Each structure stands twice: as C-alpha cells, then as structure tokens.
Image: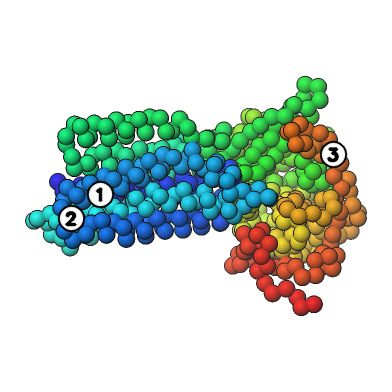
Amino acid sequence: MIRILLPLAAFLSAASSLAVEIAIVRLGAPYVGQSLLPWSAAIASVLLGLTAGHVLGGIAGGTTASTPTLRGWLAAAWLAAGLATLLMPTLTGTAAAAFAGDDGFGSGATVAIALLACPPSVAAGFVAPLVLRIAAATPHLQLPRMVGAIYAASAAGSVAGTTAAGFALLERIGAAGLAHMSGGLWLVLGAIALPARRPAVVVPIYGAVVAAIGILPMFGDNRCLLETRYTCIRLFDKPLGGADLLRFMVLDEGVHSASDRDRPDRLHLGYAALTDRLAQAAFAAAQEPRALVIGGGGATLPRTWASATPPVATEVIELDAEVARLARDLMWAGQSPTLRTIVGDGRAVLRSMPRRPTYDAALMDAYRTRSVPPHLVTAEFAREVAARLSWNGVYLSNIIDRADPPLLALSIATTLATVFPAVDLWVAGPPHSGTTNVVVAAWTNPARALRPAEMTVAATVLDAGGTPRAQDVRWRRIDLTAAKARWPHACALTLTDDWAPIDRLLAGRPACRPPSS
C-alpha cells in the first residue's frame, strides 16, 4: 500500500500547487489584468515557495525522525497549505488595495497578489522531501524505484493540475472555486495523514477542517459575473436621461465596451466615437460597405455599424465564445444578417480568409487595459490585414498606452508605416500623465484619408460619484513626422513576430537605444 500512497501524495500535492498558480493570476485579473507581469510574478512566487519548502522539508525530515514524526510534519504541511489557499480569494482584494499606487493597481499590487500563492507553495514544498524520507525509513522498499516513482508522480501531478485547471475547472467553478477545491484537497490530505488516532486529538482537527472547507469559501470576493478560460467578465449599468440605460462590459480590469440600450447609434466612449468618424470616411467611398472587427468585446461598434442606414456588413472575430454570447444577449448586439461573429483567434481566422480586398474598414480592438496580444500588432499581421482591405480602406487600432510618451502606440504606428502609405496617431485631450487611449489610423489610399488637424466627438464620462455626464473629447492628429518632433527621444520599434516587447513598452521602458540629441 505504501508503494501507492507515497506517489499518490506527491501527485495530489503537485496538482494542487499548479492549480494555485493559475488561480492566483485569475483572482488578481480584476485588479491587475493577465499580462506577462502577473503571470511572471505568480510563477516566481510559486517556485520561490516550493524552493523554500523543499529546504525546510529536508531539515524537518532530518536523519533520525521517526515515521510518525514525518507523518506529523506532512499533515501539518498539508493543513497549512490548505488554510493558506482557502484564504487567497478573501485576501486578494485587500492585498491589491494595500499596495495600490497613485495611478491605480500597478506593479506593487501585482507582486502583493502573487505573493499570496507563496505560503501554500512553501507548505506544498515540504511534501517531496518528507515522502522521500518516509520511503527511506520504510523497510522492504526498493528505494531507487520508489524515488523515481515519487518524482514521476510529482511531475505528472503538475501536468494534471495545470491541464485540469486551465481546460476544465476554471471556466466551470471560477478562480475562487479552484482555490477552494485545491485548499480543500490539501486539508483532507492533512487530516488523513495525521499520525495520532486518539479522539481527543483528531476530532478537533477534523472539525476544524470541515469548518474551514464549509465556512471560508463564503468570504471570498468573486467580482466576476462569469469566468471563462480567457477572462473575468463583469457588467454594470448606469442610467441615462429618461429611461435610457448605458451598460459597460469590463474584461479583467478594464472597460472594453459601453452600449446604449435604446440608441445603438450613440457611442459613449471617446475612442469609439472617433473610430466611427474615421471609418465613415472609408464607408462613404464604398457602394456596399463592409467592416472587420478583431476583438469584439461587447460589440458596441459592430452593433452601431450593422444597424446603420445603410447598414455596414460587419464581421467580428472574438476569441472568447462567452464574451461573444454576452455581447449578443446582454449588450444588445442581437442577431442580424449584417452582423456576424466568428469565434477564434484573430490572426488564425484572418489567415483562413481569402487574400482579396474585402473590407473597407478593419478595427483592431483586442486589448486589455494592461496588455495586447503581441501577434496582433506585428508587421506580419499588418500585411495580412492590408491584403484584405479595399483600395480606399482604413485599418484602425485602439491602443491603451502611457500618455507621454506613448511608446507602444508609436511602435505600432511605426510598424504600420512599413505596410501602409499614410499613418496617423490620434491623441485625446491635453498632454497628461497616466494612461490614455490612442487611435492609430493606417490608410491604403492617402488621397481618400480623413486627416484634419483635430476632431471633437461627444462622449460620456463618469464623475467622481459614478454618475454619467456628457463631455466633448478633442482628438489631435499627429503623423509620424510630427510624432518624432514631439517625442524626439522616444524609441519607436518595428514590431515583428520575432520581437514584440509589448509589456516593456507599456511600462514606459524603451526597448532600443533612443537617437542621440
């Protein structure tokens, strides 16, 4: 029996440990997103915890510890891991708020959230040296074979925990549910491993385990309406004048869409209103205008275009089937012959389409507040888009970047300039610090491009109390020549499939040597 139990213990503990790594990233997504930084911080936190646990477990095992003592340490490690994991959903919001900076949830909050995965990982790290020590202390075992079985079981458990969490459990029970399941498993293992059998000892511990599994999940802060394998989806409503209603779709930590229930033609986000104004210049040159949107989100612009008079035949590529479903059912995009949604990766779907001029406007809107898919902003991808645009077409990119200098937006514009003859950046409002929207417009025919010095669009903003109010947003056009003059020391890259350091640019850290002054 011991030949099965020891590898099984290593398997289950490793599976829970990797599930915790995925859970902590998703628990933090409503605060800090899911860019490279949160994932790197979570991986480092888990590995740091496992490393410390391996060292401490080896010390605890010693050379003279008896089997009951080893089982006691093993039970204590599992119980500690379970308790720490069950507390993660409750503590995530507190950690994010405690380490938030003046500009919101930045790197401090990211690291603080990731460190919540360290204590359970320390406890989980105890397991391998302890089960190996138990194996060494057990007579009649072929130790080399058992050591190999334990290590193999641990690796297999890591694979099982990762695949089960990522492909099945996360979208069914959510990140908080995943943490509760992992923590509950560790608590049960700890209770089973207890060396004592006296009721006075085990009954209180069993009672505490049952209470923890039953009570602690009630205190978790689940901020998501729906969790999918890709994102945390939230919706919130704001009443407008009369009986009208404005609904926002939030993906992870950022607002992606804002849809007007009764007036699909009314665009409340400033970037959406500007994007529509630019796209209309391309639609006006077409007899039967067509549009492609990569990253549909709440489908606000696709809904506007598809319901216009005359309608614009709009195709949307959305990675997440659940986001597409909620856009259709709860963001009022509905079903229409002029609005078609394709579920899949934007680049893969685009490459499956015929390479012929089909669309008059294409919009790249597959963004989160703190990240963008690198493979959707490279020169190679831009060539794929250009091959499917009409002669008078425009390729529009919505970019959320640092305001001054917007290194990512400058790099995307520089990249698009290798494919399109006319490229502009549209920047909102006066210069300021923090983050802002930048819209990059790349035209296939400069003679038909809409390129005034500035444009003003109507938008809706939320005041300090959360009440919506109308506000005009002034956008200024900056071509690449003017951009180089405005930000002479900014480092603009040509992004390629081989090199697209998105997170570095978003962090405001140049990825190449700036020109000498």
Residue 33 showing in the rendered view: no
Mark 1 against mark 3, which lies toward the viewer? Answer: 1
Q: Amino acid at mark 2?
A: Ala
Q: Position of residue 402 (x, y in %)?
A: 72, 56
Marks 2/3 in contact by CB < 8 Å: the verdict is no
Q: Position of residue 174 (x, y in %)?
A: 48, 38
Q: Amino acid at mark 1?
A: Trp
Query: Extreme left residue here?
Result: 140
Reading the image, the residue beneath label 1 is 73
Q: Which mark is residue 471?
A: 3
Q: Amino acid at mark 3?
A: Gln
- On the rendered image, what quadrant is the C terminus found in? bottom right
Mark 2 or mark 3: name the one nearer the start of the chain.
Answer: 2
- Give the SS element for disc 2: loop
Picture residue at 75% right of the left edge, 68% below the top: 490
Residue 210 showing in the rendered view: yes
Relative to 251, 20 lies left or right: left
Marks 1/3 in contact by CB < 8 Å: the verdict is no
Query: Extreme front residue here?
Result: 200
Q: Say above or below: 390 vs 485.
A: above
- At label 1, counting other C-alpha atoms closer than 10 Å, the crowd grade (few under 14, some 14-19, many 20 or more) is many
Task: Report, in whole angstroms, how far the alpha carbon at label 2 lies from the one at label 3.
Answer: 72 Å
Relative to 396, 212 lies left or right: left
Picture residue at 68% right of the left edge, 42% below the top: 256
- At label 2, counting other C-alpha atoms closer than 10 Å, the crowd grade (few under 14, some 14-19, many 20 or more) is some
Q: Which mark is residue 110?
A: none
- Give the SS element for disc 1: helix
Reading the image, the residue beneath label 2 is 65
Q: Position of residue 281 (x, y in %)?
A: 86, 48
Task: Report, in whole angstroms, how far the alpha carbon at label 1 lies from the one at label 3.
Answer: 63 Å
Q: Position of residue 502 (x, y in %)?
A: 63, 60
